Image (cartoon, rainbow, N blue to C red):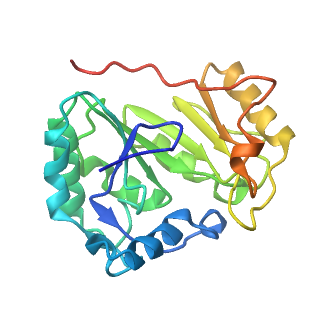
Amino acid sequence: MAQSSIEWTEMTWNPTTGCTKVSQGCKFCYAEVMSKRLQAMGIDKYKDNFKVRIHESELKTPYTWKKPKMVFVNSMSDLFHPEVPLSFIQKVFEVMNDNQQHIFQVLTKRHERLLELHEKLNWTPNIWMGVSVEDQQVEHRIDYLRETNAKVKFLSLEPLIGPLPNLNLSRISWVIVGGESGRKPRPIKAEWVKDIQNQCENLNVAFFFKQWGGTNKKKSGRLLNGRTYDEMPNYRLIA
């Protein structure tokens, strides 16, 4: 586990690491870059760089957290990657089922496998399930998410590289938007973000604006309409 600088979570937990690219949102994958750094540092977990690996020892970790946490699951991977066996995904879910004092935020670009497996998983209310949608080419991922048994469903529209003017937000609880950062980030337009914020406001969907991004994301900040948007879906942690 690790404390996280990601604005919409508190910490990360990576029972799997490694991934492969599936769409334009993956082009400048931060996890791939970070994996190379960690490998160079001699971190054993990343000795195989960005190849998909499962880490059985990580399954014990959430049982050691003393206070309720908000946890991004697999910031360095995709739990629904085809190389992750169903048996291991079920083990990860069992850990999350056992630790309902924590919120676990799971995010995937593998919408088809998510829907294929969702009935074989126990969706306790503390497991929030999301899909990444960077442009209209992959907007259909939302329809697959909508059909799952997850109690809280969310969208990560990051890196947002195109407009999404007609989102179907039925049964979606939360929308995160963010621009791309790094050395050669693709541009984000303010009108895209404002339009999504308006869509969320009109349908009473929680809206979180993470960042404008760019080559200096700290300088560009995260103000929209002169304010920050840190809305979260309604939830209750078990004490």
Q: Quadrant of residue 129?
A: top left
Q: Quadrant of residue 38?
A: bottom left
Residue 132's x, y, as percent? 56, 52
Is residue 99 found left or right of 115 in the rendered image? Answer: left
Q: Quadrant of the C terminus?
A: top left
Relative to residue 180, is residue 94 depicted above or below? above
Is residue 116 found left or right of 44 in the rendered image? Answer: right
Q: Residue at x 37, y 61 (%)?
A: 80
| Residue closest to the far front | 41
Q: Residue at x 20, y 37 (%)?
A: 65
Residue 96's x, y, as percent? 22, 41
Residue nearest the observer in this picture, 3 or 173: 3
Q: Residue at x 20, y 43 (%)?
A: 62
Is residue 63 found left or right of 106 in the rendered image? Answer: left
Residue 207's x, y, as percent? 62, 28
Residue 19 showing in the rendered view: no
